[in-house]
Image (cartoon, grey):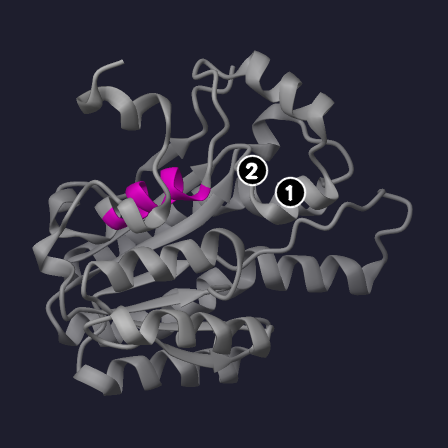
Amino acid sequence: MSKSNAGIADPAPTDAIIARYPDLRGGTVFVSGGASGIGAEIVRGFSGQGALVHFVDLDAAAGAALVSELTPKAESPPVFTRCDVTDTPALEAAITKAFEATGALYALINNAANDARHSVAEADDAFWDNSVAVNLKHQFMAARAAHPLMKAGGGGSIVNFGSIAPWIGVGDLSIYNTCKAGVLGLTRSLARDFGPDGIRVNALFAGAILTERQRRLWIDAEREAEILERQCLKRPMIEADVVEMTLFLASAAARGCTAQEFRVDGGFL
Protein backbone atom coordinates (compact mmCIF):
# COMPACT_ATOMS: atom_id res chain seq x y z
CA MET A 1 0.00 0.00 0.00
CA SER A 2 1.31 3.41 -0.89
CA LYS A 3 1.97 5.98 1.80
CA SER A 4 -0.68 8.30 0.35
CA ASN A 5 -3.39 5.67 0.83
CA ALA A 6 -2.31 4.33 4.21
CA GLY A 7 -4.77 6.45 6.18
CA ILE A 8 -7.75 5.01 4.30
CA ALA A 9 -7.25 1.43 5.48
CA ASP A 10 -5.44 2.22 8.71
CA PRO A 11 -7.32 5.07 10.43
CA ALA A 12 -5.16 7.62 12.15
CA PRO A 13 -5.54 8.61 15.80
CA THR A 14 -7.29 11.89 16.52
CA ASP A 15 -4.01 13.77 16.91
CA ALA A 16 -3.36 13.01 13.25
CA ILE A 17 -6.61 14.46 11.90
CA ILE A 18 -6.25 14.95 8.17
CA ALA A 19 -8.42 18.01 7.46
CA ARG A 20 -7.64 21.53 8.62
CA TYR A 21 -10.30 24.24 8.85
CA PRO A 22 -8.85 27.75 9.32
CA ASP A 23 -12.23 29.22 10.25
CA LEU A 24 -12.37 27.06 13.39
CA ARG A 25 -9.25 28.69 14.80
CA GLY A 26 -10.23 31.03 17.62
CA GLY A 27 -13.89 30.04 17.38
CA THR A 28 -15.76 29.10 20.54
CA VAL A 29 -17.08 25.54 20.47
CA PHE A 30 -19.29 23.94 23.12
CA VAL A 31 -19.29 20.14 23.50
CA SER A 32 -21.57 18.15 25.79
CA GLY A 33 -20.34 14.84 27.19
CA GLY A 34 -16.78 15.79 26.32
CA ALA A 35 -14.71 14.07 29.03
CA SER A 36 -14.47 10.57 27.60
CA GLY A 37 -15.06 8.40 24.55
CA ILE A 38 -16.08 10.08 21.32
CA GLY A 39 -16.70 13.33 23.20
CA ALA A 40 -13.12 13.53 24.44
CA GLU A 41 -11.81 12.91 20.93
CA ILE A 42 -14.05 15.70 19.65
CA VAL A 43 -12.56 18.03 22.26
CA ARG A 44 -9.08 16.99 21.15
CA GLY A 45 -10.01 17.50 17.53
CA PHE A 46 -11.33 21.03 17.95
CA SER A 47 -8.45 21.92 20.24
CA GLY A 48 -6.05 20.78 17.54
CA GLN A 49 -7.78 23.15 15.12
CA GLY A 50 -7.04 26.08 17.42
CA ALA A 51 -10.64 26.46 18.60
CA LEU A 52 -11.53 27.60 22.11
CA VAL A 53 -13.32 24.55 23.43
CA HIS A 54 -15.71 24.56 26.36
CA PHE A 55 -17.00 21.15 27.37
CA VAL A 56 -19.21 19.69 30.06
CA ASP A 57 -19.53 16.25 31.60
CA LEU A 58 -20.53 14.57 34.85
CA ASP A 59 -17.07 13.02 35.28
CA ALA A 60 -15.04 15.78 36.92
CA ALA A 61 -11.85 13.72 37.16
CA ALA A 62 -11.87 12.79 33.47
CA GLY A 63 -12.67 16.37 32.49
CA ALA A 64 -9.80 17.77 34.54
CA ALA A 65 -7.41 15.14 33.16
CA LEU A 66 -8.32 16.07 29.59
CA VAL A 67 -7.71 19.75 30.29
CA SER A 68 -4.31 18.92 31.78
CA GLU A 69 -3.44 16.81 28.75
CA LEU A 70 -4.36 19.44 26.18
CA THR A 71 -3.34 22.69 27.87
CA PRO A 72 0.43 22.43 27.16
CA LYS A 73 -0.13 21.98 23.42
CA ALA A 74 -3.31 23.98 22.77
CA GLU A 75 -3.39 27.50 21.37
CA SER A 76 -6.38 28.08 23.63
CA PRO A 77 -6.59 25.73 26.62
CA PRO A 78 -9.96 23.96 26.79
CA VAL A 79 -12.35 24.91 29.57
CA PHE A 80 -14.17 22.20 31.52
CA THR A 81 -17.30 22.62 33.61
CA ARG A 82 -18.83 19.76 35.55
CA CYS A 83 -22.47 19.70 34.53
CA ASP A 84 -25.37 17.29 34.43
CA VAL A 85 -26.93 17.96 31.02
CA THR A 86 -30.35 17.01 32.41
CA ASP A 87 -30.10 20.08 34.67
CA THR A 88 -31.30 22.64 32.13
CA PRO A 89 -30.39 25.81 34.10
CA ALA A 90 -26.85 24.47 34.66
CA LEU A 91 -26.52 23.54 30.98
CA GLU A 92 -27.75 26.97 29.90
CA ALA A 93 -25.30 28.64 32.28
CA ALA A 94 -22.39 26.64 30.88
CA ILE A 95 -23.29 27.60 27.31
CA THR A 96 -23.58 31.26 28.32
CA LYS A 97 -20.17 31.00 30.02
CA ALA A 98 -18.66 29.74 26.77
CA PHE A 99 -20.22 32.60 24.82
CA GLU A 100 -18.99 35.20 27.27
CA ALA A 101 -15.39 34.02 26.89
CA THR A 102 -15.15 35.52 23.39
CA GLY A 103 -18.54 37.10 22.77
CA ALA A 104 -19.38 34.49 20.18
CA LEU A 105 -20.48 30.88 19.85
CA TYR A 106 -19.27 29.24 16.66
CA ALA A 107 -20.47 25.66 17.13
CA LEU A 108 -22.56 23.53 19.48
CA ILE A 109 -21.86 19.80 19.54
CA ASN A 110 -24.67 17.89 21.26
CA ASN A 111 -22.80 14.67 21.96
CA ALA A 112 -23.81 13.58 25.49
CA ALA A 113 -25.77 10.33 25.68
CA ASN A 114 -26.24 7.18 27.73
CA ASP A 115 -26.66 3.85 25.95
CA ALA A 116 -27.21 1.73 29.06
CA ARG A 117 -28.99 -1.47 28.08
CA HIS A 118 -32.44 -2.05 29.52
CA SER A 119 -35.35 -4.39 29.07
CA VAL A 120 -38.82 -3.03 28.45
CA ALA A 121 -40.04 -4.60 31.69
CA GLU A 122 -37.51 -2.82 33.89
CA ALA A 123 -37.91 0.61 32.29
CA ASP A 124 -40.16 2.43 34.75
CA ASP A 125 -41.30 6.06 34.56
CA ALA A 126 -38.15 7.41 36.20
CA PHE A 127 -35.88 5.46 33.83
CA TRP A 128 -37.84 6.72 30.82
CA ASP A 129 -37.69 10.33 31.98
CA ASN A 130 -33.96 10.23 32.70
CA SER A 131 -33.14 8.46 29.44
CA VAL A 132 -35.07 10.98 27.37
CA ALA A 133 -33.51 13.86 29.31
CA VAL A 134 -29.98 12.63 28.57
CA ASN A 135 -30.42 11.38 25.04
CA LEU A 136 -32.79 13.91 23.48
CA LYS A 137 -34.13 16.68 25.73
CA HIS A 138 -30.69 18.18 26.43
CA GLN A 139 -30.09 18.59 22.70
CA PHE A 140 -33.20 20.73 22.36
CA MET A 141 -32.42 22.76 25.48
CA ALA A 142 -28.82 23.38 24.42
CA ALA A 143 -29.92 24.45 20.95
CA ARG A 144 -32.53 26.75 22.46
CA ALA A 145 -29.86 28.39 24.63
CA ALA A 146 -27.38 28.64 21.75
CA HIS A 147 -29.81 30.14 19.24
CA PRO A 148 -29.81 33.79 20.38
CA LEU A 149 -26.05 33.69 21.00
CA MET A 150 -25.32 32.40 17.51
CA LYS A 151 -27.85 34.77 16.00
CA ALA A 152 -26.07 37.70 17.62
CA GLY A 153 -22.85 36.59 15.92
CA GLY A 154 -24.42 36.19 12.50
CA GLY A 155 -24.78 32.41 12.52
CA GLY A 156 -23.26 29.17 13.67
CA SER A 157 -23.39 25.40 13.44
CA ILE A 158 -25.20 22.86 15.61
CA VAL A 159 -24.38 19.16 15.34
CA ASN A 160 -26.82 16.78 17.02
CA PHE A 161 -25.59 13.25 17.65
CA GLY A 162 -27.85 10.41 16.70
CA SER A 163 -27.08 6.75 16.10
CA ILE A 164 -27.78 4.05 13.55
CA ALA A 165 -29.00 1.87 16.44
CA PRO A 166 -32.73 2.50 15.76
CA TRP A 167 -32.33 1.51 12.12
CA ILE A 168 -30.45 -1.74 12.74
CA GLY A 169 -32.58 -2.81 15.69
CA VAL A 170 -30.07 -3.02 18.51
CA GLY A 171 -31.76 -4.94 21.32
CA ASP A 172 -32.44 -3.79 24.89
CA LEU A 173 -32.26 -0.13 23.84
CA SER A 174 -35.89 0.77 23.19
CA ILE A 175 -35.81 4.20 24.88
CA TYR A 176 -32.34 5.09 23.60
CA ASN A 177 -33.42 4.07 20.09
CA THR A 178 -36.55 6.17 20.39
CA CYS A 179 -34.48 9.22 21.34
CA LYS A 180 -31.87 8.70 18.65
CA ALA A 181 -34.57 8.33 16.00
CA GLY A 182 -36.08 11.56 17.33
CA VAL A 183 -32.80 13.40 16.76
CA LEU A 184 -33.54 13.46 13.04
CA GLY A 185 -36.92 15.15 13.53
CA LEU A 186 -35.43 17.60 16.01
CA THR A 187 -32.59 18.43 13.64
CA ARG A 188 -34.79 19.10 10.65
CA SER A 189 -37.19 21.21 12.71
CA LEU A 190 -34.43 23.34 14.23
CA ALA A 191 -32.78 23.74 10.83
CA ARG A 192 -36.02 25.20 9.48
CA ASP A 193 -36.50 27.50 12.47
CA PHE A 194 -32.90 28.68 12.79
CA GLY A 195 -31.95 28.86 9.11
CA PRO A 196 -33.06 32.49 8.61
CA ASP A 197 -30.54 33.46 11.31
CA GLY A 198 -27.66 31.80 9.49
CA ILE A 199 -27.54 28.82 11.84
CA ARG A 200 -27.01 25.38 10.32
CA VAL A 201 -28.30 22.28 12.12
CA ASN A 202 -27.21 18.79 11.10
CA ALA A 203 -27.34 15.31 12.59
CA LEU A 204 -24.40 12.92 12.80
CA PHE A 205 -25.43 9.29 13.04
CA ALA A 206 -22.55 7.15 14.22
CA GLY A 207 -22.29 3.42 13.68
CA ALA A 208 -20.50 0.88 15.82
CA ILE A 209 -17.63 3.06 16.97
CA LEU A 210 -15.29 0.83 18.94
CA THR A 211 -14.54 3.01 21.93
CA GLU A 212 -13.02 1.66 25.12
CA ARG A 213 -16.48 1.69 26.73
CA GLN A 214 -18.07 -0.27 23.90
CA ARG A 215 -15.34 -2.91 23.97
CA ARG A 216 -15.52 -3.15 27.76
CA LEU A 217 -19.29 -3.43 28.06
CA TRP A 218 -20.92 -4.57 24.84
CA ILE A 219 -18.63 -5.57 21.97
CA ASP A 220 -16.53 -8.70 22.31
CA ALA A 221 -14.55 -10.38 19.52
CA GLU A 222 -17.58 -12.28 18.27
CA ARG A 223 -19.75 -9.18 18.10
CA GLU A 224 -16.96 -7.23 16.39
CA ALA A 225 -16.73 -9.92 13.71
CA GLU A 226 -20.50 -9.64 13.16
CA ILE A 227 -20.20 -5.87 12.81
CA LEU A 228 -17.38 -6.09 10.28
CA GLU A 229 -19.37 -8.62 8.28
CA ARG A 230 -22.19 -6.09 7.85
CA GLN A 231 -19.94 -3.09 7.20
CA CYS A 232 -18.87 -2.28 3.66
CA LEU A 233 -15.54 -1.14 5.12
CA LYS A 234 -13.84 -4.13 6.69
CA ARG A 235 -12.03 -2.36 9.50
CA PRO A 236 -13.09 -1.11 12.93
CA MET A 237 -14.63 2.35 13.03
CA ILE A 238 -12.91 4.53 15.62
CA GLU A 239 -13.48 7.90 17.27
CA ALA A 240 -11.33 9.78 14.74
CA ASP A 241 -13.77 8.82 11.97
CA VAL A 242 -16.53 10.65 13.83
CA VAL A 243 -14.30 13.61 14.68
CA GLU A 244 -13.44 14.25 11.03
CA MET A 245 -17.14 14.58 10.13
CA THR A 246 -17.87 16.69 13.21
CA LEU A 247 -15.13 19.18 12.32
CA PHE A 248 -16.40 19.40 8.76
CA LEU A 249 -19.99 20.06 9.81
CA ALA A 250 -18.92 22.72 12.31
CA SER A 251 -16.73 24.50 9.76
CA ALA A 252 -17.48 26.85 6.91
CA ALA A 253 -16.59 24.02 4.54
CA ALA A 254 -20.11 22.71 5.23
CA ARG A 255 -21.72 26.14 4.74
CA GLY A 256 -24.33 24.73 2.37
CA CYS A 257 -25.29 21.79 4.58
CA THR A 258 -28.23 21.95 6.96
CA ALA A 259 -31.23 19.79 7.91
CA GLN A 260 -29.21 16.73 6.88
CA GLU A 261 -28.28 13.37 8.36
CA PHE A 262 -24.66 12.31 7.93
CA ARG A 263 -23.78 8.70 8.72
CA VAL A 264 -20.35 7.60 9.87
CA ASP A 265 -20.82 3.85 10.06
CA GLY A 266 -18.48 2.21 7.57
CA GLY A 267 -21.43 1.48 5.31
CA PHE A 268 -23.41 -0.68 7.74
CA LEU A 269 -25.90 -2.66 5.66
Q: Is residue 90 visible?
A: yes
Residue under label 2, please give it.
Answer: 210
Task: Identify whether 126 is placed above or below 159.
Answer: below
Q: Is residue 84 visible?
A: no
Is residue 49 rendered to the left or right of residue 78? left
Q: Position of residue 259 (x, y in %)?
A: 29, 42
Three-letter code for the amino acid on which mark 1 is drawn: Gln
Residue under label 1, please give it.
Answer: 214
Residue 146 found in image quarter: bottom left
The reply to whether callout 2 and callout 1 are in contact (CB within 8 Å) is: yes
- Of residues 130 and 241, which is closer to you in this image? 241
Three-letter code for the amino acid on which mark 2 is drawn: Leu
- Magenta stretch, residue numbers: 239-247
Task: Identify whether 86 is placed above or below 119.
Answer: below
Q: How many marks?
A: 2
Residue at figure coordinates x 50%, y 28% from the top left = 236
Element under disc 2: loop
Residue at figure coordinates x 51%, y 14% from the top left = 269
Residue 193 found in image quarter: bottom left
Magenta stretch: residue 178 in it?
Answer: no
Magenta stretch: residue 242 in it?
Answer: yes
Determine the CA span between mark 2 and mark 1. 6 Å
